[in-house]
Amino acid sequence: MTISSRRGWSEELIGAWRQRDLTAILAGRDIKLRYRQTALGVIWVVLQPVLVSGVFSFVFGSIAKLPTAGVPYFLFAYSGLVGWNLFANVLSRSSVSLIGNSALVAKIYFPRIILPLSTIVGALLDALVGSTVMLILILASGRPIDILPLLTLPLWIAWTALMAIGVGLLLSGLIVRYRDFNYVLPLMLQLLLFGSPVAYASAAVPQRFHLAYMLNPLAPLIDGVRWSFLGIGQPSGPSLLWSGLLSLIALAVGLETFRRAEARFADVI
């Protein structure tokens, strides 16, 4: 069977929707495989951000003494990691989804876009666990929870996942042909972590650098997640418009790149 590269975005997405049962099966398989051979299993979803928040608390809270608008630094860092981990998980898993399932791609026909899309489910599940732990930590600290900002949390989660899958689609198509991107991505994620308001607030960035800093479209989304939990650092309208525009561009470019590369996946993977 020949996979035509002339299929448009709509055909790709319609095909994925028609085979949504396969998407669910692949998502469930990835979730099971991720924790099947680990001693702690799903506990890692909680333990990893807790440990990172602890390190950040010591380095940036106790030593650097970065401002957190009166919020305990551990809560401040953990709230930022909820948004960051969602973005990093969707991006890293979707970008390698094709080469990680090379046997399926080479031997069986199905809409290939299902593979990167199926990674979103596990990342959203991790974000749900992280958000639940965050709410427990807030209650344990004695801080009140503002319901109105909290209601916007699904918006920030969905928006962050949308941006990540757009970039992930772009990289998944490129990595099949150019494996160098598979080695560059972890480095770029490390740099982006410290270029995003995870360990510090956007307000802590010097004013002369603030405009350039907010060109990072992920920054207002992490600010939004933190605001929904803690009620501090509400993102500005212009930064959200910029982030929304780049998210749509990333999704459009990712879909187009994936569509054009799909016809060659089975030959080069």
Image (cartoon, grey):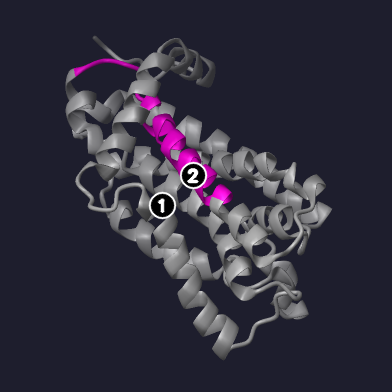
User: In the image, is residue 238 part of the stretch drawn in magenta?
Assistant: no
Looking at the rendered structure, which numbered label has been put on residue 167? 2
Residue range in magenta is 108-132
Q: x and y percent of residue 228 in the render?
A: 72, 52
The amino acid marked with disc number 2 is Val
Question: Crowdedness of circle 2 by 10 Å Cα count: few (<14), some, many (20+)?
Answer: many
In the rendered image, is residue 78 in sight? yes
Mark 2: secondary structure? helix
The amino acid marked with disc number 1 is Val
| Residue that appears at 35% across and 18% down | 22
Q: Which of pointers 2 and 1 lies earlier in the amino acid sequence?
A: 1
Eyeballing the image, is 256 above or below 38? above
Eyeballing the image, is 236 above or below 33? below
Compare residues 39 and 223 and report the one nearer the observer. Answer: 39
| Residue that appears at 63% across and 53% down | 135
Question: Crowdedness of circle 1 by 10 Å Cα count: few (<14), some, many (20+)?
Answer: some
Q: x and y percent of residue 8 in the render?
A: 50, 18
Q: Which residue is mark 1?
A: 45
Q: Is residue 17 left or right of residue 208?
A: left
Q: Residue furthest bottom?
A: 63
| Residue that appears at 20% across and 34% down | 268
Eyeballing the image, is 170 above or below 60? above
Number of marks in picture: 2
Compare residues 5 and 249 and report the one nearer the observer. Answer: 249
For the N terminus, the image quarter is top left
In the rendered image, is residue 197 in sight? no
